[in-house]
Image: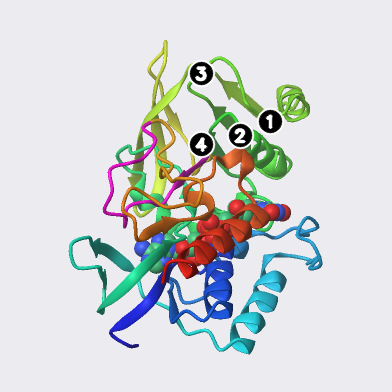
Amino acid sequence: MDNSYDVTVIGAGPAGISAAIWCKRLGLNVIIVEKRKKIGGQLQKIRNDIIDYPGLISSNGDELIDSFEKHLQKLNIPIKLNEKVLTIDKENKVILSENHSWFSKYVITATGSGPRKLNIPGEEQLNEHTKYSSTSKNVDCFRGKTVAIIGGGDHAFEGALNIAGVSKRVFLIHRSNTFKARKKFVEQAISNPKITIMKNSQVTKINHENNAVKSINISNKENQTLEVDIVLIRIGVSPNGKVLPIESHDNKSSLVDVDKNLRTSVPWIFATGDIITPPALSSISTAVSQGMIAAKTISLEV
Ligand SMILES: Cc1cc2nc3c(=O)[nH]c(=O)nc-3n(C[C@H](O)[C@H](O)[C@H](O)COP(=O)(O)OP(=O)(O)OC[C@H]3O[C@@H](n4cnc5c(N)ncnc54)[C@H](O)[C@@H]3O)c2cc1C
C-alpha cells in the first residue's frame, strides 16, 4: 500500500467498485479499501436471481461478485481487503484505518448500509447466532423452535411465512398498529395459525442463558415476558456513515447529505450508494451510477 493516492474509495460494494473502475479509466491513482475479506458488500446476501442489472443476469449475488472481481482484476485496480477505515483526518486529508494511515487528495465513501438496530440490552449477543440470518436458506434451523420476529415490513412478514411451516410458533412483534408489509404477506400471516401478530408492542430486552436466547421483555398493555428460542430483528436498514467526519446527516434517516455531484459538506469527500439513498430507491444500478458521478466530478478537478 502506498502512502498517497489521488482517490481512496472506502467500501467494495457496487458503488465503490464502480467508482474505482471510473477513477482508473479516467487516469486517477486510486485504491479501494474494504473492511471485509471479500468484495461485494450486500451482494453477498443475495441468494435469489438478480434480473434487474443490465447485461449481467446472475443466479445470485456471488455470481455477480465474480463478474465484478474479474473486472477489477482486468483493469488492475488495487484493492486492500480486511482494511477497516476508522476515520478521516479532515485537516490533513489523512485516512486512518485499523492498520495504516495514508494521504488522499479525494475520498469516495461507499460504505453502504446494514440492518437497523434496536439498541436494546441483549441485542449484541445475537450477532453470534448468524446461522439464523436467512429464513429461506437455513429453514431447518427453525424446526420446532419458538421464534420472535421483530418488525412490520416485508422482510419481517416474509421471514415469518418462510419458517411458519417448520417452527413451533412464530410471534411477529411490531411497535405500531399498522404494517408497511405488502397486503398479501399480512393476509397470509393473519390466516396462518402458527403466527401470532402482536401490535403496539415494543421489545425492550433480550434475555440470554447459557449462550442461548431465553426470553424477551415486551412493553405493551400487559408488559409481558415471552419465552422464545430465537429472535430475528427485521426493522429495516440504516446507512453506515460513521467514518465520515461530517455533521450533515438527515436527522431522521441518517442518510449523508450531498450535492448534485455527490459531494459532502467537506469538498474533497464524496458519498455514493446506499449511504445517500433512501432504502426504497437503493439498488445495484443506483449505486453503480453514483460511483461514476463522483469519479467523473473528481477527474474534472484533479
Ligand atoms: C437480500 C438483498 C437482496 C437485494 N436484491 C437486490 C436486487 O435484486 N437488485 C438490486 O438492484 N439490488 C438489490 N439489493 C440492494 C443492493 O444490494 C444494494 O443497494 C447495493 O449493494 C448497495 O451498494 P453499496 O455499494 O452502496 O453498499 P454495500 O453493498 O452495502 O457495500 C458497502 C461496502 O462497504 C464496506 N464498508 C463499510 N464500512 C467500511 C469501513 N469503515 N471501511 C472499509 N469498508 C467498509 C462494507 O463491508 C461493504 O462491502 C439487495 C439487497 C439485499 C440485502
The numbered disc on residue 170 is 2
Give me the C-alpha separation between circle 2 and circle 1: 6 Å
Query: Of the residues shown, which amino acid type is indicated by label 3?
Result: Ser
Which one is in front in this view, the residue at disc 2 or the one at disc 4? Answer: 4
Give me the C-alpha separation between circle 3 and circle 4: 12 Å
Q: Which residue is mark 3?
A: 176
Q: Quick check: 177 above or below 154? A: above
Give the image quadrant in which the ligand numbered 1 is located.
bottom right
Q: Earlier in the sequence, mark 3 or mark 4?
A: 3
Q: Do the numbered discs 3 and 4 sit on residues whose CB atoms are within 8 Å?
A: no
Give left or right: position of 121 versus 174.
left
Mark yes or no: residue 140 visible: no
> Is residue 230 highlighted in magenta?
no
Q: Do the numbered discs 2 and 1 sit on residues whose CB atoms are within 8 Å?
A: yes
Residue labelled 2 has its Cβ within 8 Å of some atom of ligand 1: no
Mark yes or no: residue 79 visible: yes
The numbered disc on residue 235 is 4
Q: Residue at x 57, y 41 (%)?
A: 279
Q: Earlier in the sequence, mark 2 or mark 3?
A: 2
The numbered disc on residue 194 is 1
Q: Quadrant of residue 102?
A: bottom left
Query: Of the residues shown, which amino acid type is indicated by label 2?
Result: Val
Query: Of the residues shown, which amino acid type is indicated by label 4?
Result: Ile
Residue 6 x, y percent position in the rendering: 38, 76
Give me the C-alpha separation between circle 4 and circle 1: 21 Å
Closest to the observer, 281 or 211: 281
Closest to the observer, 112 or 124: 112
10 Å crowding of disc 4: few (<14), some (14-19), many (20+) = some
Q: Do the numbered discs 2 and 3 sit on residues whose CB atoms are within 8 Å?
A: no
Give left or right: position of 281 versus 173.
right
Q: Earlier in the sequence, mark 2 or mark 4?
A: 2
> Is residue 239 highlighted in magenta?
yes
